[in-house]
Image: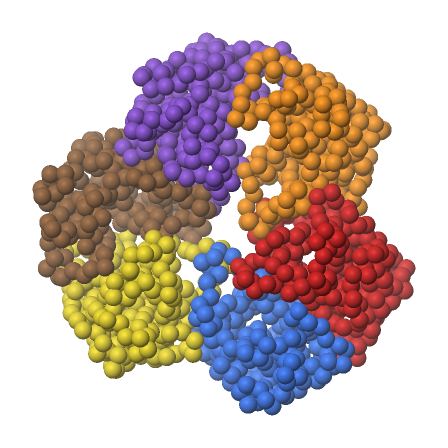
Chain colours: A yellow, B blue, C brown, D red, E purple, F orange
Amino acid sequence: MRVDGREVNQLRPVTIETNYLMHPEGSVLIQVGNTKVICTATLEDKVPSFLRGQGKGWITAEYSMLPRATQERTVREASRGKISGRTMEIQRLIGRALRAVVDLEALGEKTIWIDCDVIQADGGTRTASITGAFVALTQALAKLHKESPFEKFPVTDFLAATSVGFIETIGPVLDLNFAEDFEAMVDMNLVMTGNGRFVEIQGTGEEATFSRDELNTLLDLGEKGILELIEIQKSVLGEDAKLIQN
Amino acid sequence: MRVDGREVNQLRPVTIETNYLMHPEGSVLIQVGNTKVICTATLEDKVPSFLRGQGKGWITAEYSMLPRATQERTVREASRGKISGRTMEIQRLIGRALRAVVDLEALGEKTIWIDCDVIQADGGTRTASITGAFVALTQALAKLHKESPFEKFPVTDFLAATSVGFIETIGPVLDLNFAEDFEAMVDMNLVMTGNGRFVEIQGTGEEATFSRDELNTLLDLGEKGILELIEIQKSVLGEDAKLIQN
Amino acid sequence: MRVDGREVNQLRPVTIETNYLMHPEGSVLIQVGNTKVICTATLEDKVPSFLRGQGKGWITAEYSMLPRATQERTVREASRGKISGRTMEIQRLIGRALRAVVDLEALGEKTIWIDCDVIQADGGTRTASITGAFVALTQALAKLHKESPFEKFPVTDFLAATSVGFIETIGPVLDLNFAEDFEAMVDMNLVMTGNGRFVEIQGTGEEATFSRDELNTLLDLGEKGILELIEIQKSVLGEDAKLIQN
Amino acid sequence: MRVDGREVNQLRPVTIETNYLMHPEGSVLIQVGNTKVICTATLEDKVPSFLRGQGKGWITAEYSMLPRATQERTVREASRGKISGRTMEIQRLIGRALRAVVDLEALGEKTIWIDCDVIQADGGTRTASITGAFVALTQALAKLHKESPFEKFPVTDFLAATSVGFIETIGPVLDLNFAEDFEAMVDMNLVMTGNGRFVEIQGTGEEATFSRDELNTLLDLGEKGILELIEIQKSVLGEDAKLIQN
Amino acid sequence: MRVDGREVNQLRPVTIETNYLMHPEGSVLIQVGNTKVICTATLEDKVPSFLRGQGKGWITAEYSMLPRATQERTVREASRGKISGRTMEIQRLIGRALRAVVDLEALGEKTIWIDCDVIQADGGTRTASITGAFVALTQALAKLHKESPFEKFPVTDFLAATSVGFIETIGPVLDLNFAEDFEAMVDMNLVMTGNGRFVEIQGTGEEATFSRDELNTLLDLGEKGILELIEIQKSVLGEDAKLIQN
Amino acid sequence: MRVDGREVNQLRPVTIETNYLMHPEGSVLIQVGNTKVICTATLEDKVPSFLRGQGKGWITAEYSMLPRATQERTVREASRGKISGRTMEIQRLIGRALRAVVDLEALGEKTIWIDCDVIQADGGTRTASITGAFVALTQALAKLHKESPFEKFPVTDFLAATSVGFIETIGPVLDLNFAEDFEAMVDMNLVMTGNGRFVEIQGTGEEATFSRDELNTLLDLGEKGILELIEIQKSVLGEDAKLIQN
């Protein structure tokens, strides 16, 4: 069985605490099992230079871990003076995923800064970041919408993410924790929308390969998990969820 | 009166939640009013090269703020590729302060890494970091002491810190929040031990100066606040507090 | 139809010139349409510190573009003093992909350095890099095998990569050039082995999403293209191809 | 007794050579015992962006040591590619101290760059830098005042600095040289104005602590030394000293 | 005799392939023996800030080596995060040399970016870069001249470079390959114009010295080689060579 | 005539003050007209890794300018976080030049660190650095020789440097100051030994060229100046000069 007693197609317990911090326009603490991430959304009234004057907005994301989010202390990227390849990949993924469900013309010349800071890590930090950041972003835009309504609310659909993988002794599983992730031969991150379309598929054999059939089983598992995560998002967003008309 | 209704010699409400994270040897979430800092202590079985072979340990500290700990988003030091002068000053202060109440010979050839990550900032983040880090450090050493007892428990006294300052319209005040800090003409950070001795005095006129009498009033205020903080530390440390024999 | 007159399921002309440079153990110039990449393989008789003493080898990859490989001059990463997120993603992908078809125990305590330098870019530089690097790596190991035979030749299967995508006016297409890539709403890079298993799937909606059916069409196209690429690899590898026993 | 035969309350011999270099607007070579620092003041007709348009000026300081200012060769910060925490602390201190005796509104939209370069180090380099930089700054502004008079001369008071400390075998001493500094259990830097007010107190127990009484003795010693330093400043400034009306 | 059988005053075989890449305004692959360099010229319609508004243009050069251009793999400068002193020297030399034969007023407010990327190194990479870059630059300007003619064609003379040196067992030699360069006691790079004037002489004793007579012999050899290189440039430039009226 | 009234073949007044600093093994302040450079030599009992175990020593040089050595304030390289191309060129030149007159085998496994810090700049800082550094290096080795004699004193000959150039309105001149250097069309740095052999010739046309005859005139001027500089070195070295047996 799975190390924490879950079914192969079962998510870990998920909670999303909204308005977690006093300063940001949107902020949540998302917990997926023992993984805890603070996600904030900051609105800025300008866009990067490559977009200036086009009437479009932008979303950019940054991701980091506290040094003791991990079992062994991780050296701070600020101390090393540079950002690792892993961090860059993750923050590019988060930004790209969110941009797929935000109408950047409807947003107008604004930048949304997403910050995902992992307080405690137990696998799945990048997918928890996406699921949490979506809520923070939506709340930040909903707050702005109350003060000065958008013609069209820029969020076009729900968005959540999870991981699936293939463990030799178990087979395909949903939402891997750190111990499972370490053991997995195939690791796949999926980002999907509320209407069941893919935004991102990143499947990787870890010194291993996978067949088309195995791929299909993993996609089925992931889709189930993401739809459950979106239900949780809807519930914590409450009235704000209704602004999203997909 | 003060912006939040406090007496001039009154601390903000302080809570220290211990064992806040699952991985570190010691970890707390300290809240001083709206200022929230996660402090962790990590034990490592080696020392920096300048101490190797001397039978002594070392304590080193790192400090950081989440980008949206602050009212306006602060650019990450990892993104800028270097640590600011302010951060360096603070992390050097935290390490130096803690070393004053730890017997490094009794500790043996170990390094204690202190990480202070500000989740939410409302003034006094460096003093809250010291007060919280002392608890995390003591708990990490107490845990180790239970498994393999030190001949002499290395923590020699309690240690806490607060700020005092001089506000033109009010006069001297204890434990400034961000709004007060911004207004203050004189800003002083004090670190003291459980038996009332100074470890560090850092008093600065902000484009202003102060007299010997004003200095004495500020020191009196600070001493009162620090003794109250140490009572809180004792209470959250419980049995572990008894290991400290000052 | 397609901008260069190809069928939707047709690769661009591919040539792989082996032994392209005099110094490296393995080197090729791969051309996929107008995309030209020099791929080299360097053997080093040691491994990174995290692998030392485990009897296993390692493969690491670096990727770069000449400043005028592109239409507009790109600033050198050496001049900017740091490697972009895009470059990091690509070089991590190349290394990971190659490791999936090399038996690192059979390789022994050696590092294979792969360098992919894009001389001219017209779309698909990362997939051309993987396809070319596989040939350079195999030739480098084959040369070593002749001098001092491996017990088991470390390359376990063929490996090639291509891109597929979804263009609004055409639908799904194979092997996108730069103009097509720019237009595509969905962009997917596939890495597969000689026996038709996946090593990596990276599918991304560019401010867009895609359905499960669309995904399946893209995977079919990609599989066809990769099998053709592997035939070309076999042909240029000649006798060396027989060392690979999948 | 003290290692160099001084009384506990005696400064080392101090000389300040003005107009030491041909290019800067103000420049001195200050010698405090064997410590030698070149201090220059540069006037620039603009302010940092955070002050633009406010009619106020700014003072910023940089500090460095020649590699062989010290007994052992120190690696250049330019070679290491970054500025140490110690250097940052010192240059922030120098700038802050000088700003306390300069009326930034009277200065107008100008930046004064202070450069303190230690040619030879024997303890007390940061306090010698402040004492010397004050003279260089005053001369630079006096020269400008002769060409185009300020409505109000911006320097509002004299400013000097020294160190005091507590040595186990001697007790409290004034103006520590390197050997004394190395031995001291408490180390305190004081910056004061001509009318005897504090600008900065930085007192640190070096793995030690100090009582309120000990603090008072140290402050008395420091005040005596600083008033002597200010007499020397007045003497070398000559006529220019009269522009300062405290 | 020489390791490759050449006479002491004989160049290696030289070929210059023009229009080597599809994107740049000018591009060549120059081969001098086994040394191969891709040189490109990029025209940009602005100048660095220090030249703005003066009606003059600028030429700037960058130089790099592929990691396996060399016998042992060279770490990428992008990976090390900084450019080596050797690279800086070379790129400053290339830019300076080309500026000596371009009338920057006639060029107008344009920047010409020269990129020299060494594909394979066997000695003399910096001089091959200058010789090749001159052709790429001339072709880029000739192409522009056809579209919108300059009043005066900015290239004022031909320019080529070679190395000469002193080998203990042979004496003075022209155009050293890597093995010869390694052995040489004196190493000199010469840059000259079509009418036989010097642009740059860089002669260096490698832990050795040289007399005035030896210098004169080396200069004679170099002059002979450079005039031969200029004949090759004229031949590959064809009609474009006639635009240069020295 | 020349801006400072000198003959075209006349050096500026030169003084070399030895034992300028208390800590280094060798140190001088060299003044060449208004150019002032502190040169120090530091002996270290190990060599860089590429020389380890070969019984040979090494000489490495670093060069820097104080920010206000120049007319306009120059930004510190430590603040910019990297060393400029100009600085790298100069420090490579200084090290290479000194190595030509030091027998590295006779030196044994030692590194000599040369630091040249320009206090005031008025042209010719790199050549003054070489001339001064030679004296500091010789004194450092002479001091060591008295304590523990070398079998063969490692300095094999004298070494000095100067600049020559071609000014349009005057013609060829020796030892250019900053104003002359700025105006010069050809700028040449020469390094020679006591017996009149060249170590380094670096001649550069500044957007100009020069003939073989002009070169010869410049070399004659430089030789005259360098022999005068070597006489001054001999005089300040006194007894130590006799250790050099060229």
Residue B46, position in %: x, y?
57, 62
Q: Quadrant of the C terminus of chain A?
A: bottom left
Please state if C95 lies on the left or on the right of E156 as rendered: left
Q: Which of C52 and D64 is in front in this view?
A: D64
Please state if B118 lies on the left or on the right of F34 as rendered: left
The residue positioned 47% from the left and 23% from the top of the image is: E101
Q: In this view, does B82 lie above or below D194?
A: above
Q: Residue A60, located in which quarter of the rendered image?
A: bottom left
Q: In this view, does B142 lie above or below F96?
A: below
* Residue A80 visible in the snapshot: no
The residue positioned 77% from the left and 38% from the top of the image is: F28
Residue A69, position in %: x, y?
42, 69
Q: Which of A134 and B97 is in front in this view?
A: A134
Q: Which of E177 and A151 is in front in this view?
A: A151
Q: Residue D205, located in which quarter of the rendered image?
A: bottom right
Residue A221, position in %: x, y?
18, 68
The residue positioned 44% from the left and 21% from the top of the image is: E156
Residue D5, position in %: x, y?
90, 59
The residue positioned 61% from the left and 53% from the top of the image is: D45
